[in-house]
Image: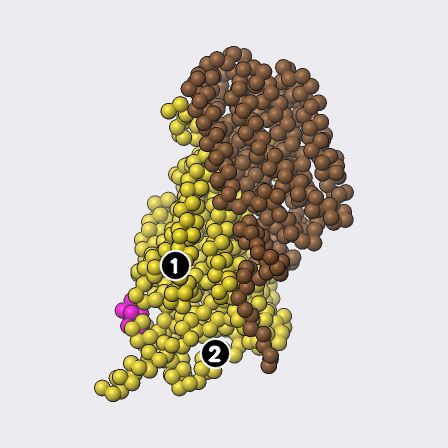
Chain colours: A brown, B yellow
Amino acid sequence: MSEVEVLKPLKTWSHLAKNRRKPSEYEIVSANLLYNTRDPNAPYELDPDMSMNRWYKKYRDGGPFQHDDWNAFRDPDELVYRTYNMVQDGQETYVFGLFDQFNEREHDKALEPTWGGTLARLYTPGRYLFHTLQMASAYVQQMSPASTITNCAAFQAADSLRWMSHAAYRAKELSLTFPDKGFGTGERTYWENDPAWQGFRELMEKVLIAWDWGEAFVALNLVAKPAVEEAVLRKLGQSARHNGDTLLGMLTDAQLLDADRHRRWATALVKMALGKAGNAEAIKGWITKWEPLADKAIDAFCAALSDVPNAAADAKAATRAFRRTLGF
Amino acid sequence: MATLGRLDWYDIARTTNWTPKYVQEDELFPPEMSGSMGLPLSAWETYDEPYKQTYPEYVKVQREKDAGAYSVKAALERSKMFENADPGWLSVMKAHYGAIARAEYSASTAEARMVRFGKAPGMRNMATLGMMDEIRHGQIQLYFPHEHCSKDRQFDWAHKAYDTNEWGAIAARHMFDDMMTTRSAVGVALMLTFAFETGFTNMQFLGLAADAAEAGDWTFSNLISSIQTDESRHAQIGGPLVSLLVANGKKAEAQKMVDIAIWRAWKLFSVLTGPIMDYYTPLEHRKQSFKEFMQEWIVTQFERALIDLGLDKPWYWDQFMAEIDTQHHGMHLGVWFWRPTVWWNPAAGVTPEEREWLEEKYPGWNATWGKCWDVITDNLLAGKRELSYPETLPVVCNMCQLPINTTPGPAWKVRDHALDYKGRTYHFCSDGCQWCFEQEPERYAGHLSLIDRFLAGMIQPMNLGGGLQYMGLAPGEIGDDAHNYAWVEKVRAVREKAKAA
């Protein structure tokens, strides 16, 4: 121990110093934050065989979706908590500005009662669906093997809460104009019984128990969410415009901005994963497994959108177009 | 106003439970992940969170909070706080960031468990905000210390600590993993949000903020007060759950989890927060003693919260009350003595004036802990610093992972609480730690403490050098006395003055 090296201060965290360039705020506060990947035998610092350690070893580490360095993942939007709130506060100011202006102009009173009934059946029950996206995203959050992935999933869960909140807000507001349509009270019945929702209900109940993290990510982000976004946001938005409901069309457009961001990170993650042999087959297998359920969900929902021509076919084609950009 | 008020639609946004049809309820909410204790979904729908916030309110308020915290930091970046701060204060920051930042980030995972597996819709929504909060706390508490990396290698540990086998990091992971990341949704709500955040984070974030303000570190003071405003919201996830469980005949189950969490949190705070408040913070900036903070936040406020919600004081309360007078002094002595094994420079905090303060706050300190410090001080005065360094490692507890210690002196009653379980002997520091183990041995039995690893030959060479290497500590980052022993000269001056008189 004669020539002991004395470590000198570095310009950044030692794990980033190796990169030999100035790290961004995003990297400083987002990269390599999970410590549950340090010991493959015991993700958590307790008995290696206690139940939660077994859960992580089986469903996170033991599945077919593998990479040598998940921590290399970077969110293409490089969102951090601070900037997420800036972006979404701006977005919410916009949406609540719409609510305000359309309310001022008595937008809802100008809607046909039949369209009011359609909203009670096909829009506001969507809060149950959006909530399942919130729950499923939170599962991907807790099971992801790198903090840069975890953050994207957390923001996605928060965005799902956002969509759900809009549906709750509108349920209340619409109930004031259409007191007899069951707004704010009848959504659960529609969600549980109406044929239009049963496809999505089945899809999401099953996605929610896809425990393998790779499968959970693929089923949610590559199959289920695109189906929801194309059918329940985009096609319903088109139907709304067709029925003089400019507000809902603008609202779903605003929500689709979140969806586009979710697809960007999902795309980046898939692209990175494809660098490792075996992942393409795993992803393909999961898409093949989940696509029929998603298609069935789109068919059932879009069948109710009688005034949007080719709604189901367009929506299904759009989900496939997205997956094609990933090479699937 | 042409927009609705929050309470007009809040209840609709938390009416999201449905009856699963295509999968079974127990598949959707596996009991091991939800911790639902057999209560039906309808029982969970009575859950009513007291702190209500909506998504648009959240992103607005949090944006403003961050704008405040980051602008204070930016404004004070040239204030030379780092250069002018007492070295003891820098140690407070290093210990705090290293022990806290990534644990908070990890708490986002625990919050996500409640989002996915909680059976109460209000809990799932509030935990979504809680998950976001914890990402904030991880990120902001990495961003702030990062600027100090270039000045002091120990600040690297704000990020690095949790990647290592440093003993404090092992202890912190063991505790946080036990009370949050490995628990069900109900376990997280009771142990992390109710027991830990309602009780203990006030100590760390408000108590320490008060000291930081006194020390003139406005950036840190402002930062951790801002964090506490989030904690005080999402900490309220647990309270209504306690009421719900008590009302549904599950008081004993709730009580047990709360008792485990309080005991475990206490032990970690005795080694982290106790020394920070009573020894590292410069004397003139100490707002209150650790014990006084504990009495205010834990004994008075938290004890009342427990009783109000229908729980009892934990069975070990008398032992706990006794320990808030003593335990952290032993932890501090240990941390200072084993100072090469930590990522900060412990301040001894035992100049004559500081000892007077300790004696005033903790009567009997001089006759007990003081005697140990006398030996250390005498060795240092005699120029025998080598005698003040450790040569090996202390015995640590198989639950809290901290050195087993108690008050020295005539009343010395250190004893090993040994337990044989399935052919292995476990050692505990206290009845409380042994009791935690006995509640669910399978959670802990296969874990090896640092000393178990040492004795198993997993740490080579089997000496302090090998230990430091195993802990990821190298020269340039290992701890030493915060004031480079300048305090010893103060003692010498006082003694010489006394001799002359």
Residue in the image at 71% along x and 22% along y: A313
Q: Are marks 2 and 1 on the same chain?
A: yes
Parent chain of label 2: B
Answer above or below: position of A304 versus A89.
Answer: above
Mark 2 = which residue?
A: B389
| Sequence order check, earlier mark of 2 and 1 | 1
**In the foreground, A326 or A78:** A78
In the rendered image, which quarter contains the N terminus of chain B? Answer: top left
**In the foreground, B30 or A83:** A83
Which amino acid does the dot numbered 1 rest on? Answer: Ser
Which amino acid does the dot numbered 2 rest on? Answer: Tyr
Looking at the rendered image, the disc whose residue lies closer to the viewer, 2 or 1, is 1
**In the foreground, B332 or B187:** B332
Answer above or below: position of B430 versus B61.
Answer: below
**In the foreground, A37 or A187:** A37
Within 10 Å of disc 2 (Cα), the crowding (few <14, some 14-19, many 20+) is some
Within 10 Å of disc 1 (Cα), the crowding (few <14, some 14-19, many 20+) is few
The stretch of residues the image draws in magenta is B355-361
Left or right: B463 in relation to A286? left
Residue in the image at 69% along x and 33% along y: A322
Q: State the CA–CA distance, disc 2 to disc 1.
A: 36 Å
Mark 1 = which residue?
A: B79
Left or right: A213 in relation to B83? right
Q: Is residue A281 visible?
A: yes
Q: Quadrant of residue B210?
A: bottom left
Q: Quadrant of residue B205?
A: bottom left
In the rendered image, which quarter contains the C terminus of chain B? Answer: bottom left
Residue B358 falls inside the magenta stretch: yes
Left or right: B2 in relation to A57? left
State the mark number for residue B299: none
